[in-house]
Image (spheres, rainbow, N blue to C red):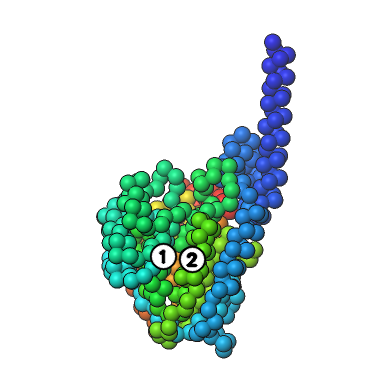
């Protein structure tokens, strides 16, 4: 009996070792970064059973096939972008346009929507005024008073003959109730969930999520920014106050690029081609140049990281960034530090309160790296700040969904609109100046913090490649 148990144990150990080695090899082949591969391999080899299971659930994906097919789909869609109102002279947005694979457009207008009430009022009113089509996309839609207000506004327009498509990246069993969806589908509203690469647990995936927020009305008016659909943004849910966030109302030719981004997501999710609706370019509506940049984990250029690097290189005198998470890729951090060393006024605004403690503590471990090069980090005091906004000098502004972290840079589908023009930049400057006025500059070194805080920050940073 003892001999049998010895042989059995040896066989089990051999099988586990082989599985761990195979998982490690797959992590080496498929991880987006060397740091990510190293983190997975160490976890698998140190904890073979737990590490292999975690990798199969959260790390392993048929990424190469997904990347190839999704990239081909996006390229086909973006090739339909209208050449009308394209800026033919060199602009400050040209680098961002190359990252976006779309041209810089002229004749756009952008208005800021600060916080939840202003955003929901503007978006819901625009939905109620829709005449023909509505594209609606959010990462999170809650079944609360805000979510039901959105649902009811969409149902009213559908009953009047407006064609409506809704994308929502919910997790199975944790998303909207079936009854909520049934009410939308009963009036002809089409619902879909974005798709990522094939995984062991299918739709149960934490990576390759679609984090974009977008509403396009009649292909003439668009809204995008950082807000999801939840009463947390109006202060009726969160214990850390009403979430501070920003959306933008946009008119002009760049709206067609936003519609194409939605259409690409919809085509990949459902197989239905909406390009005949999305491709027509609206008439000029203002004086801003603009481009819609939508980083994707299917890219081969890591567009999310390049976006921040391009911001840093474009800055001559100022680079202000507001982000809820500050866990930058090494290349992004280097670009920010180099901008600060060049004398650029680099300021990063982050939350002073946490919604996710791992990313909150991990951010603290990066503060000193930026501060040592002359950059500044500020923590927003009144509530949790969720906006993803950037200001470069006096003429470039960006509003969207891209966080300054590795997940946004490599693993999520994101979206932002960059504008060139003093009117938009001035509005963003005034807004951020108010936010910095409600923030505290970080002047303490990590080694001088509370012992426990310092330890948690250093441990959390170890997990940065997989956060």
As drawn, 75 above or below 17: below
Which mark, residue 28?
Answer: none
Q: Does the image show residue 394?
A: no
Left/right placement of residue 3 relative to residue 384 reads: right
Q: Pick whichever, 457 or 400, lies toward us.
A: 400
Left/right placement of residue 223 relative to residue 100 reads: left
Place of residue 205 in the rendered image (x, y in percent of width and height, measured from the top left): 52, 47
How many other residues sit within 10 Å of disc 2, few (<14), some (14-19) or many (≥20)? some
Which mark is in front, 1 or 2?
Answer: 2
State the quadrant of the N terminus: top right
How far apart are the two marked residues, 1 and 2, measured between alpha carbons?
A: 10 Å
Count of marks placed on residues:
2
Splitting the image into 4 quarters, where does residue 156 fall? bottom left
Which mark, residue 135?
Answer: 1
Place of residue 324 in the rendered image (x, y in percent of width and height, measured from the top left): 43, 61
Name the residue tied to disc 2: 274
- Mark nearer the N terminus (1 vs 2): 1
As drawn, 330 above or below 458: below
């Amino acid at each position: 009996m003892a001999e049998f148990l010895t042989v059995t144990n040896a066989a089990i150990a051999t099988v586990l070792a082989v599985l761990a080695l195979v998982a490690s090899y797959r992590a080496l082949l498929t991880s987006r970064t060397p740091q990510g591969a190293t983190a997975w391999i160490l976890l698998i080899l140190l904890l073979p059973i737990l590490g292999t299971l975690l990798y199969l659930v959260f790390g392993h994906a048929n990424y190469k096939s997904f990347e190839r097919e999704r990239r081909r789909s996006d390229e086909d869609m973006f090739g339909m972008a209208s050449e009308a109102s394209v800026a033919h002279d060199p602009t400050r947005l040209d680098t961002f346009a190359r990252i976006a694979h779309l041209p810089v457009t002229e004749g756009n207008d952008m208005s800021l929507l600060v916080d939840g009430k202003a955003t929901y009022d503007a978006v819901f009113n625009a939905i109620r005024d829709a005449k023909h089509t509505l594209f609606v996309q959010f990462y999170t839609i809650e079944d609360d008073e805000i979510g039901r207000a959105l649902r009811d506004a969409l149902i009213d327009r559908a009953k009047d003959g407006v064609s409506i498509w809704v994308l929502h990246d919910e997790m199975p069993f944790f998303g909207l109730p079936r009854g909520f969806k049934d009410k939308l589908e009963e009036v002809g509203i089409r619902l879909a969930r974005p798709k990522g690469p094939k995984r062991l647990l299918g739709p149960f995936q934490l990576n390759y999520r679609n984090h974009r927020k977008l509403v396009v009305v009649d292909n003439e008016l668009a809204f995008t920014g950082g807000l999801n659909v939840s009463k947390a943004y109006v202060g009726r849910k969160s214990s850390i106050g009403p979430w501070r966030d920003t959306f933008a109302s946009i008119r002009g030719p760049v709206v067609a690029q936003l519609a194409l981004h939605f259409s690409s997501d919809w085509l990949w999710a459902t197989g239905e081609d909406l390009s005949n609706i999305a491709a027509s370019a609206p008439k000029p509506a203002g004086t801003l140049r603009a481009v819609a940049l939508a980083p994707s984990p299917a890219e081969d250029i890591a567009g999310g990281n390049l976006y921040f690097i391009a911001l840093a290189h474009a800055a001559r005198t100022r680079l202000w960034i507001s982000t809820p998470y500050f866990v930058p890729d090494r290349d992004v951090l280097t670009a920010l530090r180099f901008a600060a060393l060049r004398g650029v006024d680099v300021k990063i605004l982050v939350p002073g309160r946490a919604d996710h403690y791992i990313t909150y503590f991990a951010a603290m471990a990066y503060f000193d790296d930026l501060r040592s090069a002359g950059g500044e980090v500020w923590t927003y005091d009144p509530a949790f700040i969720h906006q993803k906004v950037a200001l470069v000098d006096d003429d470039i502004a960006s509003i969207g969904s891209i966080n300054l972290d590795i997940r946004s840079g490599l693993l999520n589908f994101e979206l932002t609109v960059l504008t060139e023009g003093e009117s938009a930049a001035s509005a963003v400057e005034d807004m951020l100046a108010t936010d910095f006025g409600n923030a505290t500059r970080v002047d303490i070194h990590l080694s001088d913090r509370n012992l426990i805080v310092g330890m948690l920050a250093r441990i959390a940073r170890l997990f940065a490649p997989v956060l």
